[in-house]
Every structure is written in C-alpha cells, then in structure tokens.
Image: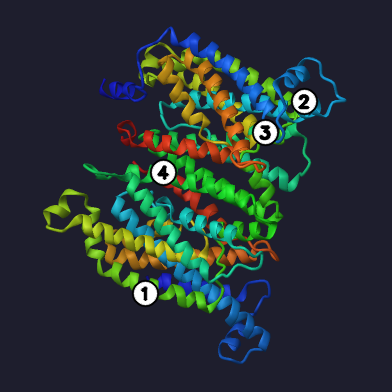
C-alpha cells in the first residue's frame, strides 16, 4: 500500500480535471497553429505577404517564383515541423505515462541517438539510400536503443527509477554517439552529419513527408486508442493490474508507437530533444491527468513549440540558421534542471 | 599491483612497435639505446614515445579523478564527465577555434590552458546548480545536473562548429572524440607537474577520502571539517581530469571504469585504491590508443571512441547490478 501511494504521487502536477480547459486549448491551439503556419511561411529569407501565400495555396501557379518558393521550400518545411513537433511530444507523453517518469523523453533515453547512429551508418555505407528505407532503419535504431535501456531496467531488481533510466539513456547515447563519431571521422562526413544531427528543418521535401505521414497518422490513432489504458498505467502497475489490465501488452504497444513516432521524426529532422520532455508537462498542467486529453493537447502544443522554434531559428541570426535542436536544448535544459531539483526524482 | 605494472610495461612495448610504420621489437630496443637508424629514432622519440607517456599520464589522471568523485558523491556511477569536464573543455576549444582569426594551424600550446579553464568553469556551474543551501550536495542532483549541463554545452558546440570549414571541423571532431594529440615532449612536460603534485596531495588525503566515503554524519562526528576537505578533493579531481582532458581530448568513461576495476583488484581502501586506479587507467588508455592506431590503418580512430565502446556497455552492466 505504501509503494502504491508513493507511486501515485509522482506525476502529481495537477490532479484536478479541468473539463473546460481541454476544448479551449484544442481549438485555440489549432487556430493559433494555422496562424503560426501562415506567419512562418511568410517570413523567410525574403518576406512574402500573406495574400500571396494564400494565393499560392489556393491557386498554385508554377510560373511565379514566389509561389515556387512557397510550395517547394516553405510549405513542406512548415508542415514537417508541425508533424515532427507533434510526434516528439506525443512520444514523450506516452513514455512519461508508461514509465511514470517525469524525465522520460526520446532524446534523454537514447532513442534519438539510436536512430541517428543507424542513419550515420547508412550515410557511410549506403549513401543515396531511398528515404523510405532510411526511415525504416531509423525505427530499427530507436528500437535497439530502447531495447537496451529498458533491458537494463528490467534486469535490475529495484526497477526503473528516474535516475537509473536517465543514466542508462545517457550511457547508451554516449556509446551510439561514439560509434557515429567513429564513422563520421573515418568517412569524413562529420560536418554533414553534424548539421543534420543538430536538427535541420531546412531540407524537408514533400516526398519525405508523403512517406512519413501515414506512419505518424497511424501512430497518433494508436496513441489515442491506448490513451485510456495509459492513464490507468500512469497510476501504477498495481492499480492497472487490479483493474484487470494486461500491463505488458499495453506497454509493448506503447513502445511500438513511441518507436515509430521518434524514429520517423529523427529520420526527417535529426536528433531534436526536449520537445517530448517539456510539452507533456505543460499539457498535464493545463488539462489534468487524463491521457485522453493529454495526448491531443501534447500534439497541438508540440506543433506550436516546434513552429515557434523553427521561426526563431531563422530569425535569430539571419541569413544563417541556428539549428533548431540547439535552440530547443537551450529552452529545455533549465526545465530539465527544474524537474530534477524537485523532490519526486530524488528517490 | 605488480601484475598491473608488468601489464603496463608489456603494453608499453607493444605500443612502441605498432603504428603507421611498424617497428620490430629488436629495432625498438636498438633505437632506445641509440643504435637505430635516423628514421627509427625520429618515429620513436619524437612521435611514439611522448604519445605513449601522455596516455599513461592522462589515463592515470582521469582514473584517479573518477575515484575521488565516486568516493565523494558515494555514487558508483559518477565520473569526471558527469561534472562537465569534457564538455567545458570542449566548448573552450571550439570557442577558441571559432574566434581565432587565421585559418592556419591552431597554436596548439594555448589549447591545454583553455581546456583546463573551460573544465573548471563547467564544473563550477554544475556544482553551483546542484548545491542546495539546507540539504548540501545530493549525489542524485549532481548527476542529473551534470547530464543536463553537458547536453546544453554540446548543443552550443554544435551551433559553433557548423560555421567551421572542413579542416577546422575535422580537427575539433577528432579532439572531442578523444585523440591523444599531444604527441610532443612539451605536452608531457606540461602535464607531468600537475599529475605529480595532485597525486601527492590526493594520496596524502587517502585516509580522509576513506572517511568521506562513510557518509555525512560519521565524518562530522569524527571532528573533520567535511565540507572543506570535500571541496579541496573535488577541486583536485577537477584539476586532474581537466589537465588530462586538455592534452588527450574528450575521453570519457576511464574515470568511471578505472576505479571499478581497481576495487575488484585491491578492495575499497583508498590508500591502495587510488594508486591501483591510476595504474588501471593508464593501462586502459594505452590499450585504447594502441588499438585506435592499429585497427583501421592507415587512418586512426580516436582512443576516446574505443574507450566509449568498451566503457558504455560496462557502465550499463553496473547500472543493471546497482541497487
């Protein structure tokens, strides 16, 4: 009974459900998202006025250079950052719910490094591999990293404390990054790899989005289907088992969804961390502990964060782009420190 | 201990033989006594020998530093990298290269000093962030803060390195991955005094470190001024690791594994543990550097990568076993 109580207290951000907040955030967030996308398309190396943007979306005229810039460069970039932001955030929300660990995030737990390592391997040995294969390999890489990190957790007797999970994640990351570095130095592809690794949104193409979209869409639907069970799981294994839940099955499905979301995102933008860490906390704070609400809110807020970060990355130091991953790390780290300082983690 | 000493000697000799140009053991012997050809003595005395000595010193420094940090935090998973030493040193090196006006070869003798300053600053930052007024220094918070600050610093480094030209980038990438690049007697002379002085102090304080291992209450009960000793020891750990990293690049994991292997060999008493850690660390780094030079000839793999490939699985194993 005591362990049960302690565990239930861990994610105690805000236990009161706020029914009114959910539709407000969802609808308001979506409206804000559309406005943000328009602004993000308009502001680039050259500013294009919003009428032209609208015009290009409605009646695309391939003769006009501005329309071309919008269709071929800016639109895929914006759609990509929205998708990726949502995917990282939902992956983080699922991981935090399943592990009851406030510090869980695909970057901190080494999944991003795993996907990135496999991609570095592909760049080195099979340059010019089709994107659809790259994405599959990226799932595989994230899966290997997750397998190792969770394997460590399940071997040890005292289970996965937040501290242990973070340390296992950072060791797995260190190993995979070292291997990637080895490849990069040996094949002298370091700088290309570093740019992509830092989170580059600039090179996103429609073709990539077309391949990525169905995966992410299915993963979102799966996440929503799981959401009720995740809520129960987030109360602790004892409660979940008591309610007749097959915890291992839900966890397995959840991990599968996380791998697809993180892997697909990393294969498009590189290793961008901290979105999955911050956003679910914000969502929980706003709408309470029910994952049926947390997951859609995380998706919307994640998209907004990514969109803002992308806009920031282009406006901070024009015409150069600041890597989005670095920008998000600078926002995310103080937040991580704040979470780490709180009592819940000390265990 | 004797066994370790012999192992080091053997590796030392093997390491002198291997490299881009192989020297037969007999040639090495002859050259050592001044009877080799000019080429042979050039390779041996000017390139290989200083590099091997640097890896012995740096490996020992890192391992002893790790031993102190593990003792003070009472966490078997701590190491100098956790205190941000590699990250801080790396950031200073990257900053220096990005602001250094010419695209010529970097004035290498500035780098160790800068790396040391960077290591010190980063550890101060982590210490300050992790310290809480009423509860002191909790090992958990130190580890988590270290992870966070290190990842922040690497984000900053990535931003800076993107503007580099390929040569600069290759240099920095190799440095960060941990190459024994100080293959020059001047670096040996620069590192040696640090190691000697700090080893002297730390070995002298071995008994205090034993007591600090026991936890907060006992040392205060025994009348030691815990906080002062702890700070001084932590400071020497930072200086040891910082100066080692300065000449050897960002090598992680030796500070973690070295002490653990040493505990297996000689037990937890610091009077024996500290010297044993030094020997194990030295051995590990020579082996890694020698392997790095010989696996992928003619190109070289940084020793740090080999250490990580061996070290990270070991770390995970420790993590799985720790209670």
Callouts 2 and 1 close, C-beta under 8 Å: no
Residue at position x 38%, y 11% from top? A17
Q: Position of residue A11 (x, y in %)?
A: 37, 24
Q: Nearer the viewer, mark 4 or mark 3?
A: 3
Is disc 1 placed on a helix, strand or loop? Answer: helix
Give the residue number, with chain letter if any, for mark 3: A268
Residue at position x 58%, y 24% from top? A303
Callouts 4 and 3 close, C-beta under 8 Å: no
Is disc 3 placed on a helix, strand or loop? Answer: helix
Mark 2 belongs to chain:
A
Give the label on residue A251, or none. Answer: none
Give the residue number, with chain letter if any, for mark 1: B196
- Above-or-below relation of B46 to B235: below
Instruction: Tell me the distance, in whole angstroms, between the alpha carbons under discs 2 and 1.
Output: 65 Å
Instruction: Tell me the distance, in whole angstroms, between the alpha carbons under discs 4 and 2.
Output: 50 Å
Q: Nearer the viewer, mark 3 or mark 2?
A: 2
If you read the primary sequence from the N terminus, does the residue marked by circle 3 or circle 2 appear first? 2
In the orientation shown, which residue stands out farthest toward the right? A63
Q: Is residue B102 left or right of residue B205?
A: right
Give the residue number, with chain letter if any, for mark 2: A71
């Amino acid at each position: 009974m005591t362990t049960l109580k302690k565990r239930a207290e861990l994610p105690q951000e805000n236990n009161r459900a706020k029914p009114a907040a959910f539709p407000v955030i969802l609808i308001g967030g979506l409206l804000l998202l559309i406005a943000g996308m328009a602004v993000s398309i308009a502001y680039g190396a050259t500013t294009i006025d919003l009428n032209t943007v609208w015009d290009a979306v409605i009646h695309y005229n391939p003769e006009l250079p501005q329309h071309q810039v919008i269709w071929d460069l800016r639109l895929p970039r914006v759609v990509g950052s929205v998708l990726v932001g949502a995917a990282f955030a939902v992956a983080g929300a699922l991981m935090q719910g399943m592990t009851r660990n406030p510090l869980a995030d695909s970057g901190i737990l080494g999944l991003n490094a795993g996907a990135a390592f496999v991609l570095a391997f592909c760049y080195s040995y099979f340059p010019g591999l089709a994107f659809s294969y790259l994405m599959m390999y990226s799932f595989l890489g994230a899966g290997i990293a997750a397998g190792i990190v969770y394997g460590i957790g399940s071997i040890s007797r005292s289970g996965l404390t937040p501290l242990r999970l973070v340390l296992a994640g950072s060791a797995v990351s260190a190993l995979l990054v070292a291997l990637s570095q080895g490849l990069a130095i040996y094949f002298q592809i370091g700088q290309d790899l570093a740019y992509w690794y830092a989170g580059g949104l600039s090179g996103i193409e429609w073709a990539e989005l077309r391949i990525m979209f169905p995966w992410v869409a299915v993963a979102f639907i799966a996440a929503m289907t799981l959401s009720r069970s995740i809520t129960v799981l987030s109360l602790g294994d004892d409660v979940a088992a008591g309610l007749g839940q097959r915890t291992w099955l839900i966890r397995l499905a959840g991990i599968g969804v996380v791998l697809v979301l993180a892997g697909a995102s990393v294969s498009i933008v590189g290793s961008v961390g901290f979105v999955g860490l911050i956003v679910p906390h914000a969502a929980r704070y706003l709408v309470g502990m029910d994952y049926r609400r947390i997951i859609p809110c995380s998706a919307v807020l994640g998209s907004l964060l990514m969109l803002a970060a992308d806009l920031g990355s282009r406006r901070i130091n024009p015409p150069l782009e600041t890597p989005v991953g670095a920008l998000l790390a600078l926002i995310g780290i103080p937040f991580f420190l704040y979470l780490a300082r709180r009592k819940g983690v000390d265990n | 201990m004797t066994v370790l000493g012999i192992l080091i000697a053997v590796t030392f000799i093997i390491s002198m033989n291997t490299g881009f140009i192989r020297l037969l053991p007999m040639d090495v012997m002859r050259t050592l006594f001044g009877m080799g050809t000019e080429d042979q003595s050039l390779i041996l005395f000017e390139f290989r020998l200083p590099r091997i000595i640097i890896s012995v010193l740096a490996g020992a420094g890192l391992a002893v530093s790790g031993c102190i940090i593990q003792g003070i935090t009472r966490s078997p998973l701590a190491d100098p990298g956790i205190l941000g030493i590699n990250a801080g040193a790396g950031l200073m090196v990257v900053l220096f290269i990005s602001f250094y006006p010419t695209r010529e070869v970097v004035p290498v003798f500035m780098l160790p000093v800068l790396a040391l300053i960077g290591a010190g600053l980063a550890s101060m930052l982590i210490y300050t962030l992790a310290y809480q007024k009423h509860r002191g220094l909790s090992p958990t918070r130190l580890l988590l803060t270290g992870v966070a600050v290190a990842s922040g610093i690497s984000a900053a480094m990535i931003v800076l390195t993107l503007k580099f030209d390929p040569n600069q980038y290759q240099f920095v990438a190799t440095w960060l991955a941990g190459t024994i690049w100080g293959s020059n007697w001047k670096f040996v002379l620069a590192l040696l005094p640090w190691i000697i002085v700090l080893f002297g102090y730390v070995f002298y304080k071995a008994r205090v470190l034993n007591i600090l291992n026991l936890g907060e209450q006992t040392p205060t009960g025994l009348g030691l001024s815990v906080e002062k000793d702890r700070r001084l020891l932590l400071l020497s750990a930072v200086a040891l690791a910082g100066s080692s990293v300065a000449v050897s690049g960002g090598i992680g994991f030796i500070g973690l594994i070295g002490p653990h292997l040493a505990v297996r060999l000689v037990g937890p008493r610091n009077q024996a543990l500290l010297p044993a850690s030094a020997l194990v660390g030295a051995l590990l780094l020579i082996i890694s550097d020698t392997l790095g030079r010989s696996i992928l000839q003619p190109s070289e793999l940084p020793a740090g990568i080999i250490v990580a490939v061996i070290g990270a699985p070991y770390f995970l194993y420790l993590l799985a076993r720790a209670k």
